[in-house]
Amino acid sequence: MLTDPAYDWLDVTVQVASEAAAAWLEKFHDQPFSLTDAVSFQLMRREGLTHALAFDQDFVTAGFELLE
């Protein structure tokens, strides 16, 4: 999977984590989002993704649609 060209691997840098914390954890301070959630949201927005395969409602709360 790591070498499969069907997948894009994105690096999580300190800058990405900082941007995610500012954009998601501060904005949605009343939600129980984890830093992992926030980084996922940030990278998904940056990449133009609108749908998520997820098992909780955090992605819906953040404005994404769940895949069924």
Image (spheres, helix red, strand yellow):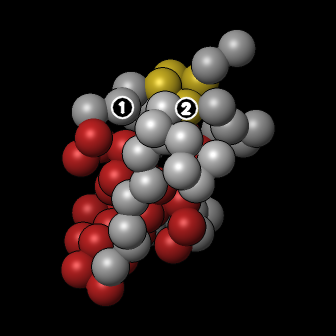
**Rendered residue at 37%/68% (across/down):** 11
Say few, some or many: other residues with alpha carbon within 10 Å of mark 1 (under 14 / 14 to 19 / 20 or more).
few
Disc on res. 49: 1
State yes or no: discs 2 and 1 in contact (Cβ < 8 Å): yes
Q: Residue furthest bottom?
A: 14
Q: Secondary structure at mark 2?
A: strand
Q: Is residue 35 visible?
A: yes
- Quick one: quadrant of the C terminus? top right
Q: Is residue 23 left or right of residue 32?
A: left
Tell me residue 64's x, y (percent). Answer: 45, 30
Tell me residue 23's x, y (percent). Answer: 26, 63
Numbered-mark total: 2
Q: Amino acid at mark 2?
A: Ala
**Rendered residue at 61%/64% (across/down):** 32
Nearest the viewer among 13 and 7 is 7
Q: Amino acid at mark 1?
A: Leu
Q: Is residue 21 visible?
A: no
Nearest the viewer among 65 and 61 is 65
Tell me residue 51's x, y (percent). Answer: 48, 25
Q: Secondary structure at mark 1?
A: loop
Q: Is residue 44 above or below residue 31?
A: above
Q: How far is mark 2 from mark 1, CA to CA?
A: 8 Å
**Rendered residue at 38%/26% (across/down):** 50
Q: Residue furthest front?
A: 3
Say few, some or many: other residues with alpha carbon within 10 Å of mark 2 (under 14 / 14 to 19 / 20 or more).
some
Q: Is residue 61 left or right of residue 12?
A: right
Disc on res. 52: 2
Nearest the viewer among 3 and 67 is 3
Q: Is residue 37 above or below residue 62?
A: below
Nearest the viewer among 7 and 35 is 7
Tell me residue 18's x, y (percent). Answer: 28, 80
